[in-house]
Image (cartoon, helix red, strand yellow):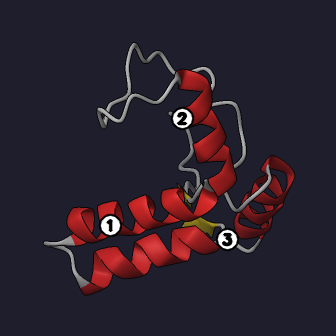
């Protein structure tokens, strides 16, 4: 019989982190139908990200060390979290508008 162990769950809620995820995505065409190339979409994604991988790792490690059950990574993660709490039934519509605006400003 094994002894019980203390186990904890941690959820990580990342905002935009500057990685190669958009460059490595398997997309055949622009999902929004705007005619953008994969390179253009990747560049727009990277222009919108607010957190470096090193900063994200530091935030996650600090959260784990402090025993947090929920770790928000990056300033935009706090925005997404607030939107989901304030307007849960309209979250996706609001987020879509915010992301379009940010994408336009990033170009």
Q: Is residue 93 above or below residue 46?
A: below
- Residues packed near mark 3 inside 10 Å, few (<14), some (14 to 19) or many (20 plus): few
Q: Is residue 53 left or right of residue 40?
A: right
Q: Earlier in the sequence, mark 1 or mark 2?
A: 2
Q: Secondary structure at mark 2?
A: helix
**Residue 12 in view, yes or no:** no
Q: Secondary structure at mark 3?
A: loop
Q: Which numbered disc, 3 or 2, marks the residue that appears first in the sequence?
A: 2
State the residue position of label 1: 97
Which mark is in front, 3 or 1?
Answer: 1
Residue 38 occupies quadrant? top right
Q: Is residue 79 above or below residue 14?
A: below
Q: Which residue is mark 3?
A: 67
Q: Is residue 4 above or below residue 78?
A: above
Mark 2 — residue?
41
Which residue is at the front of the view, 89 or 49?
49
> Marks 1/2: CA distance?
17 Å
Q: CA distance from mark 3 to mark 1?
A: 35 Å
Residues tagged 3 and 2 counted as in contact (Cβ below 8 A):
no
x and y percent of residue 71 in the render? 59, 67
Left or right: 69 as drawn, with respect to 73: left
Which residue sits at x=40%, y=82%? 82
Q: Secondary structure at mark 1?
A: helix
Q: Residue furthest bottom?
A: 86
Nearest to N terminus: mark 3 or mark 1: 3
Q: How many marks?
A: 3
Residue in view at x 67 percent, y 71 percent: 67
């Amino acid at each position: 019989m094994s002894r019980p162990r203390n186990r904890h769950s941690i959820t990580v809620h990342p905002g935009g982190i500057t990685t190669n995820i958009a460059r490595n995505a398997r997309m055949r065409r622009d999902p929004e139908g705007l005619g953008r190339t994969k390179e253009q979409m990747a560049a727009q994604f990277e222009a919108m990200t607010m957190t470096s991988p090193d900063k994200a790792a530091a935030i996650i490690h600090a959260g784990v060390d402090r025993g947090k059950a929920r770790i928000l990574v990056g300033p935009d993660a706090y925005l997404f979290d607030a939107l989901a709490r304030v307007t849960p039934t309209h979250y996706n519509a609001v987020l879509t508008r915010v992301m379009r605006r940010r994408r336009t400003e990033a170009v």
